[in-house]
Amino acid sequence: MRIQVTRTGGFAGLLRYAEMDTAERTDAPHVHALAREAVAGGLRAPAYGVPDGFHYEITVDGRTVHCADPKLTESQRELVGLVLREGA
């Protein structure tokens, strides 16, 4: 499974992008479950939260959803953190 996360907004307005391929991860079943839940809870159109908050675009195997702080689901928050921290 290929997961891509783009984060925009925030106080400085910087863009951050990372992607992850779960093919060789030992925790792939957990990441796949997070990804399914994150996509199910996302919006098809860009979402805007609070001023200076982050906006996220999550793409899982070609399907893109949007979400924004502070209205991320727990699975979206965990998936975004994982991909931005460990993705390339």
Image: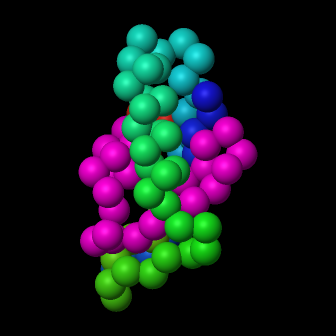
- In the displayed structure, 63 sits above or below 85; it is below
Closer to us: 77 or 41: 41
Asked if residue 36 is among those painted magenta in the image, a careful observer would answer no
Q: Residue furthest front?
A: 40
Q: How is the image coloured?
A: rainbow
User: What residue lies at 38% left-to-right and 51% top-to-bottom?
Assistant: 76
Rendered location of residue 30, percent (x, y): 38, 25
Closer to us: 61 or 19: 61
Locate the C terminus and report the quarter of the image it occupies: top right
User: What residue lies at 34% left-to-right and 88% top-to-bottom?
Assistant: 51
- In the displayed structure, 9 sits above or below 85; it is below
22 on left or right of 63: left
Q: Quadrant of residue 85?
A: top left
Rendered location of residue 80, percent (x, y): 40, 49
Locate the N terminus and report the quarter of the image it occupies: top right
45 on left or right of 33: right
- In the displayed structure, 79 sits above or below 30; it is below
User: What residue lies at 57% left-to-right and 75% top-to-bottom?
Assistant: 46
User: What residue lies at 49% left-to-right and 52% top-to-bottom?
Assistant: 40
Tell me, yes or no, if residue 12 can be seen here: no
Q: Residue furthest bottom?
A: 51
Tell me, yes or no, if residue 50 can be seen here: yes
- In the displayed structure, 11 sits above or below 82; it is below
Q: Tell me where the magenta segment starts and ends, as one range.
A: 57-83
Total numbered badges shown on the rendered structure: 0
Asked if residue 67 is among those painted magenta in the image, a careful observer would answer yes
50 on left or right of 33: left
Rendered location of residue 79, percent (x, y): 39, 43
Rendered location of residue 21, percent (x, y): 59, 27
